[in-house]
Structure formats: structure tokens, C-alpha cells
Amino acid sequence: MLSGGPLETFSVWFAMNGESSFPVKTCLSLTWVTAESFLVAAIAWSFAAWIWWHWREQRKLPGPFAWPLIGCLPELSANWDRLHDWVLEQFSDDRRTIYVQFGYPDVAVFTVDPANVEHLLKTNFSNYPKGESNCNLMRELFGVGIFTTDGELWKEQRRMASYEFSSASLRDFSTDVFREYALKLVFILSRFASTGADFDLQEMCMRMTLGTTCKIGFGVVLDCLSPSLPKIQFAQCFDDANFISYHRFVDPLWHVKRALNIGRERKLKHCVKVLNTFTYNVIEKRRQEMASFNTKPAQSDLLSRLTDLCNRGGEISHYVDTALRDMILNFIVAGRDTTAGTLTWFFYMMSSHPEIADKIFDELSTVVAVAGKHSEELTEESVVEFSKLLTYEKLGKLHYLHAALSETLRLYPAVPLVSVCTLQTLALCSKMVVVW
């Protein structure tokens, strides 16, 4: 009886019969081919089984269809320009929490359930940080500002911002700036109304809020709302950098593009360079100005106040120009886009519900104690005089206006999508488990 494996048995049988027409080398070749074929077949079978298992498991999860490996990226990329509408289409009255696979193994849970939102952003907030992966996507633009940090660093910046914005001097300065730029916007809108020309209302609001945030944040006056409405390089680069950074969420090759300095990543590098040059020049100029005032800020803007704290060895004396740059740019995106978007939707709602606009006008007339007039009877001088009557204290008495703005924010949130990660596997209030 012969023993051994198939190759040994096969070779010995030919030797006993005295035949050599089938060499041993041929046997070896056939054996390796058989082994390779078996390995390829096993891999193909395993892959097919994994696809079948993935398809079966995916059908159990509420949400858009996900392909193996690439998940929902094709459909997500195709709908990126209408992301919020696409996400909303995935929900229904009985399906308020869904799974969206960005590609293996990343799985995100989208929810519009009020109980889940409260759980994520309020009652259990500490267990849902932004996450390092999310922060890295925006790091070139926002650095280590409040939008790209977690933990103690985030708490420190939030505490400092809350302290500064609660100060009476910055509040009074901000009120004057808002009034100044609101008047500029009103006069431009009046000009469009008189000529009947078409215009982009959101762009006008963006110009106004960019002007206010830059003056409050930097103490810099940008010519955003001059009659010619010139293009502002800082604004264009800021918008482009923001869009490209945000688009990284659906671009799995952005690391490669950044390393090769091609495509959108090359443009992002240029935009960030323009922003940095502008910002660092302003910071250096402010340091020089404040040196001549010893420790007293020359202006009331946020940058002057933070620089003053540095000079006096205050709580942020360890901050350098890079940190100041990050904090100011984060402040701009927080105050510019959110306010402009809310104002645009508010004006849209007022045009859709003129009876609400009439009630707001009546409330203004009562609180400010002026006789009601039709808008076509107002002159530039009367508008300026009216704006001076709108003090910080009187704005707090405009309850109906506050309610209308709150309803606008409810229907059209300024930040409609918030992305967080989990520190551990946790159950949402809807009995679903988050695995991020």
C-alpha cells in the first residue's frame, strides 16, 4: 500500500510501471494549477457570500440602498448639491432614524426624532464629540478653533467666547456695527426695488454679515456693501475653502489629491493661503497698534480684546498668532453664514405671509413709539432716525418679531445637519443602536 499525499502516490505509480511519458515536473505543474484554481474559487466564493450577506443585512436597516464596499457614496455624491433635500426624502412619519453607509466600514445614523436629538445634543452631549475624523476634514480652514475641537480645548474656547460676548463694551460695539450695516443693506435693497432689477437676496445678506463679522471680529472694514457691490477676494476664498472642506465627506480620495496637490485640494491650499495672509497681517497690525496704547485696546473688536488679554498675561497668554487666527475664522463662519441664511428665510416667510409682516410693523411702531408709515413714504433720513431708536433694550421688547424669527429657525434651521461621533455603543431613545 502506498502512503503519502496525492502527488507522491501519483509519481510512484508511474515509476512502478516503468513509464516516464508523464514527467514529475508536469505533475507538479498540474498540482499548483489546481491549488491556484481552488484558491481563486475560494476567494470568489467568499466574496460572493460576503456580498450576499451584506445585501441581506442591509435590507434590515432603514435607509438608502448601500452597495458593498462603497456604500451610498454614488447616490450621495450625485445629490451633494441638494444634500438636505435628499436626506429628508429618506425619512417618513414612521421612519425617523436611518442608516447611511458612506463606504465600508463607515456607517452613519441620521435621525430627526426629537427625543434622539435631545439625547445627542443635550442630555448625553459629552458622549457625542465631533470626532477626530470629522475635525480633520475641516482642519486646514478652521485649525483648532471651536468647530474642530473637543474636550477641554473646546470648553476653554467656549467659556472665553461666552465671557467676551457678555461684556457690555463688545455688546454696544456690536449693536452699532449691526445698525450701520443693516442701513447699508436697506439702502441697496431700496435701490433694487425702485429699479425693479433682479438680485440674489442671500448674497446681499451674506455681504452684510461678512461686513459685520469682520468688523466685530477683526476691526476691519470690508467694502462689501458699496453701491458697486465689488467682488471681495477674502469672501470668495472663504466660500471656496468652506465648500471644498465640506465636500471631503463624500470624496474618499481627498488625501491622495492633497498629497499630489491636484484638483480641489490645490484650490483649497491657495484659498487658505489667501485667508492666512490676510488674517496674519491684521493680527500683526493690531499688535503694533496696541503697542502704542500700552495695554489698552485701540478698538473694541474681538481681536483687540483677545490680543489685550495676551499682552496682560491673562487666561490665554499662551495663545499665539495661529490660535488667534483660528478663533477669529471660526467666529466669522459662526456669525456670517448662520445669520445670513436665517435672514434670507425670514424675508421669504414674510413675503409669503404679509399679514405677519404687518403685525411685526405694528409692534415696531408701538415699541419704538413712532407713527406708522407706509414704506414708500420713508426717506433715507427717516430710516436713519428710526434705526437710532432701535436700542438693545427696545429690541428685547419685540416679542412678536422674536417669535417670527424663532419659527423661521424651527422651519429652516441655520445649522440643519450636525455630525457627531460616539465614544461607545449607545442606544438611542428610539431603541436603535448607534455604531459609528
Image (spheres, helix red, strand yellow):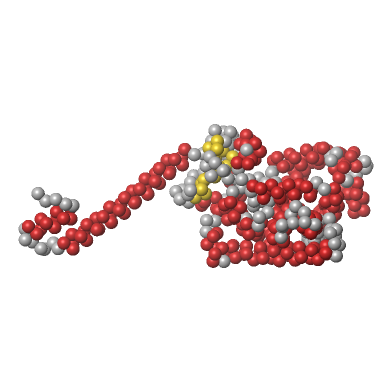
Q: Can residue 401 be seen?
A: yes
Please give left or right for residue 117 compared with residue 282 in the image: left
Quarter of the image holding residue 244?
Answer: bottom right
Q: Can residue 89 be seen?
A: no
Please give left or right for residue 71 compared with residue 354 in the image: left
The residue that appears at 88% across and 46% down in the rendered structure is 391
Placement of 57 over or under 172, stated as above or below: above
Placement of 409 over or under 43, stated as above or below: above
The residue that appears at 18% across and 52% down in the rendered structure is 5
Q: Nearer the viewer, residue 102 or 191?
A: 102
Residue 59 position, x and y percent, is: 46, 40
Residue 328 position, x and y percent, is: 73, 56
Residue 338 position, x and y percent, is: 72, 49
Q: Nearer the viewer, residue 90 or 212?
A: 212
Quarter of the image holding residue 49?
Answer: top left
Please give left or right for residue 324 compared with residue 9 in the image: right
The residue that appears at 52% across and 45% down in the rendered structure is 107
Quarter of the image holding residue 399?
Answer: top right
Residue 123 position, x and y percent, is: 65, 36
